[in-house]
Amino acid sequence: MNQVVQPDRCRVCGCTLANACVLQVGPEETMPCRWYDFDHTLCTNPRCVGSIPLVELEQMPLMRLSLP
């Protein structure tokens, strides 16, 4: 299966900043996904990250996290 890679759209689930995945982070707490990579082509949803081969993840330019 060929994936179309577009900046600012997850290549696995298709989410965007405006339509982010909702991740469960606690029993009653959720948060939106964020970008895993610098090019904004993969979100931090564990299902999306888990679907990419480890070799490819290791080669991705990662974004530096900045905490508020």
Image (cartoon, rainbow, N blue to C red):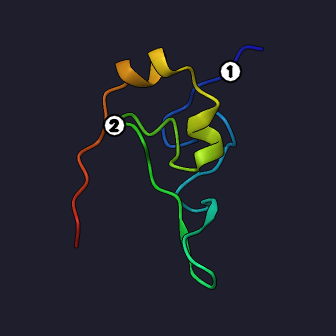
Left or right: where does residue 33 sit relative to residue 28?
left
Q: Position of residue 38 (x, y in %)?
A: 33, 37
**Hey, what amino acid is under mark 2?**
Phe
Question: Are there few (<14), some (14-19), or many (20+) residues within 10 Å of tag 2?
Answer: few
**Which quadrant of the view contains residue 47?**
top right
**Which quadrant of the view contains residue 25?**
bottom right
In the displayed structure, 8 sits above or below 26; it is above
Regarding mark 2 in the picture, which secondary structure is present there? loop
Q: In this figure, which residue is indicated by the disc labeled 2?
A: 38
Give the camera-side residue of 41 and 51. Answer: 51
Q: Position of residue 42 (x, y in %)?
A: 52, 38
Regarding mark 1 in the picture, which secondary structure is present there? loop
**Which quadrant of the view contains residue 4?**
top right
Q: Quadrant of the N terminus?
A: top right
User: What's the distance in space between the residues labelled 2 and 1, CA to CA?
Assistant: 18 Å
Residue in the image at 63% along x and 59% along y: 21
Residue 3 image label: 1
Residue in the image at 57% along x and 62% along y: 18
Q: Position of residue 60 (x, y in %)?
A: 37, 24
Give the camera-side residue of 40 and 33. Answer: 33
Residue in the image at 63% along x and 85% along y: 28
